[in-house]
Image: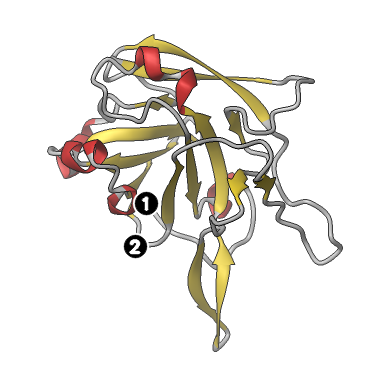
Amino acid sequence: MAIAINLNKTERILFCASKWWGDPDMPDTMEYPTVEVTEEGETYDYPLTFLCQINCEDIAAMDKTGLLPKEGMLYFFAAIDKWIGYESPTANGAGEWPKGYVSVKYAKSINFETFRSSVMVDEEDLSVAEPELEMTFEECADDAQGHKILGVPAYPEVIKEYPDMLNLLQIEISSDVKLNIMMKESDLKFGNWKRAKAFLLSR
């Protein structure tokens, strides 16, 4: 079974909780992921967009395959600015994205004392993050559409490209744009997060 993601507005403080958008709460030793870009002859590191963080305890009982950690925090970042309405030097098109344009990170344990919120700000020192949303979870079909964890991509075009991969995170950016972050089962079992691939489907 896959795990469906439900998004809700909340007044609850989501520090170190499962959340969509907002700012990631990470250990002091974890670096915010960036990708090297070149623009007008200048090369620099550009931060990826924070998608979500998932407290693994929230989904442990629903992970029937046992592919994901039972505790700790999973983080997802991707260069999706263009697809959510922002200008960006990391504007990727449809298809498989280059290495580095998606990042999956994992913290083995969650510590409220040592974790910090990594806040991205603009030139006026204002937060650039989308308002955070609370994530809740429920079991769903392996091939379900919508936001989900695990299972298989809901779209035949993606499965055709990656027949030997499982869906790690599926995102419905819009009715016409979908992003699948995928890994081989063997890499999932061993936590080889750097081997995650991103494929964007635009219809």
- Residue 145: quadrant of the picture: top left
Which quadrant holds the N terminus? top left
* Amino acid type of the residue that numbered disc 2 sits on in the rendered structure: Pro
Q: Position of residue 76 (x, y in %)?
A: 48, 43
- On screen, 124 above or below 188? below
Identify the residue position indicated by label 1 in the image: 94
Q: Is residue 151 left or right of residue 173?
A: left
Residue at 48% across, 51% down: 78
Q: CA distance from mark 1 to mark 2?
A: 11 Å
Which quadrant holds the C terminus? top left
Q: Position of residue 116 (x, y in %)?
A: 68, 47
Q: Between tags 1 and 2, which lies in front?
A: 2
Identify the residue position indicated by label 2 in the image: 98
**Colour scheme employed for the rendering of this structure:** secondary structure
Residue at the farthest left position: 164
Q: Nearer the viewer, residue 89 or 21?
A: 21
Disc 1 element: loop
Q: Is residue 4 left or right of residue 134?
A: left
Residue at the farthest right position: 124
Labels 1 & 2 near each other (Cβ < 8 A):
no
- On screen, 77 above or below 131? below
